[in-house]
Image: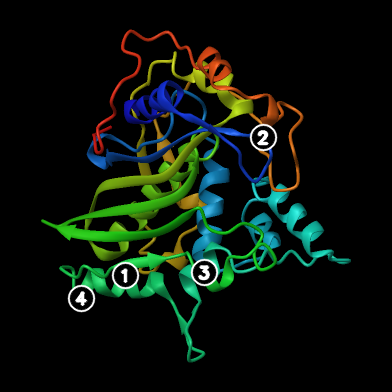
């Protein structure tokens, strides 16, 4: 996972202080890409502990097509990563009763895309069919970003990982995901693991070998209240990648997988590093953006490396 650490380095060295919807502020760069080869092991974060059950239950929730947070709790009751966004959504809309519905988030777009003529498109199932029957297609795409359903009064949080594409070559399956906005410290370790797991699931039901997860990010940022945590993480050395084990129950579709099917073998990690997640309307008292100046940024961004002000390649292996 050296590629991820290099990205944190690059942002701390070269990032620009920007305001954001939460009021916390970020250090941000635009445009990063990394590649994760599954032959090197499963890309689970080792420089801090990955919450495996939280990540995998969220992915299964997306795959189910549900937009209700209660269904996520049914899969794994301790998954709280959407709680703050849901609470904020309820407040924004002035809901008197809580139904659990979060608007048309990832699952509905993946499995129930609304067409102009009133049909629903199951993009994931269509992707499976194309991989099996037309593997040379350049249209094996799943799109979560629907401009007509992305406003604050329509959805708890518009999709951050906006679309992904599959590529088949030499009996191997790869997945390339574009992410419009990436919380590099808290979110990206989940995103890498989640889409790598999805890649393995898709490979299994299509009879292919999982090859590469390619991750492209638009706005890659570290929140200002996570800068010290990011600086701590980049001092840690990555440990060997674990192996992913999937129980073979003869699964033929994505809907047949369960949390108990997945496990990591030989997973070792450094200790967890805690950070706060802020949402719209929950302005952190950590720092007022009005106080931020470039010299202050230079102060917090000093990190103990021998090659500061580096140039990060557009695409590099992990």
Q: At 52% across and 61% down in the image, what residue appears?
A: 62
Disc 3 or 1, which lies upstream in sequence? 1
Q: Earlier in the sequence, mark 2 or mark 1?
A: 2
Q: Are marks 2 and 4 in contact (CB under 8 Å)?
A: no
Report crowding for label 3: few under 14, some 14 to 19, many 20 or more residues within 10 A (C-alpha).
Answer: few
Residue 41 picture location, percent across and down: 30, 35
Tag 1 or tag 4, which sits nearer the N-term?
1
Q: Secondary structure at mark 4?
A: helix
Q: Residue at x 46, y 45 (%)?
A: 191
**On residue 128, which mark appears?**
1
Picture quadrant of residue 4:
top left
Quadrant containing the C terminus in the rendered view: top left
Q: CA distance from mark 4 to mark 1?
A: 9 Å
Residue on which disc 2 sits: 24
Q: Quadrant of the N terminus?
A: top left
Where in the figure is residue 120, as x and y percent of width and height? 48, 83
Q: Nearer the viewer, mark 2 or mark 1?
A: 2
Mark with earlier residue (3, 4): 4
Determine whether label 3 and label 2 are within 8 Å by CB: no
Nearer to me, 43 or 233: 233
> Residue beneath label 3, please?
147
Rendering coords of residue 58 (x, y %): 55, 53
């Amino acid at each position: 996972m050296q590629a991820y650490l290099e990205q944190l380095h690059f942002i701390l060295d070269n990032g620009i202080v920007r305001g954001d919807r939460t009021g916390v502020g970020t250090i941000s760069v635009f445009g990063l890409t990394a590649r994760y080869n599954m032959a090197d092991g499963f890309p689970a974060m080792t420089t801090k502990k990955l919450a495996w059950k939280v990540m995998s239950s969220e992915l299964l929730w997306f795959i189910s097509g549900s937009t209700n947070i209660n269904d996520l709790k049914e899969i794994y009751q301790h998954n709280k990563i959407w709680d703050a966004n849901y609470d904020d959504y309820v407040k924004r809309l002035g809901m008197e009763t809580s139904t659990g519905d979060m608007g048309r988030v990832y699952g509905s777009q993946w499995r129930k895309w609304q067409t102009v003529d009133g049909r629903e498109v199951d993009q994931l199932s269509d992707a499976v069919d194309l991989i099996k029957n037309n593997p040379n297609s350049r249209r094996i795409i799943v799109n979560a970003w629907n401009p007509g359903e992305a406003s604050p009064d329509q959805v708890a949080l518009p999709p951050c990982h906006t679309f992904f594409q599959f590529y088949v070559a030499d009996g191997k399956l790869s997945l390339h995901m574009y992410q419009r906005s990436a919380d590099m410290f808290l979110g990206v370790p989940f995103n890498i693991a989640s889409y790598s797991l999805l890649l393995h699931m898709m490979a299994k039901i299509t009879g292919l070998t999982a090859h590469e997860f390619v991750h492209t990010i638009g706005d890659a940022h570290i929140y200002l209240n996570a800068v010290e945590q990011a600086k701590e993480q980049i001092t840690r050395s990555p440990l060997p990648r674990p192996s992913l084990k999937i129980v073979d129950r003869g699964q033929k579709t994505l809907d047949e997988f369960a949390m108990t099917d997945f496990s990591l073998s030989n997973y070792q990690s450094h200790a967890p590093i805690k950070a706060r997640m802020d949402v719209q309307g929950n302005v952190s008292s950590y720092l007022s953006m009005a106080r931020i100046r470039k010299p202050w940024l230079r102060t917090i961004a000093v990190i103990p490396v021998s090659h500061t002000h580096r140039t990060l390649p557009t695409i590099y292996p992990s």
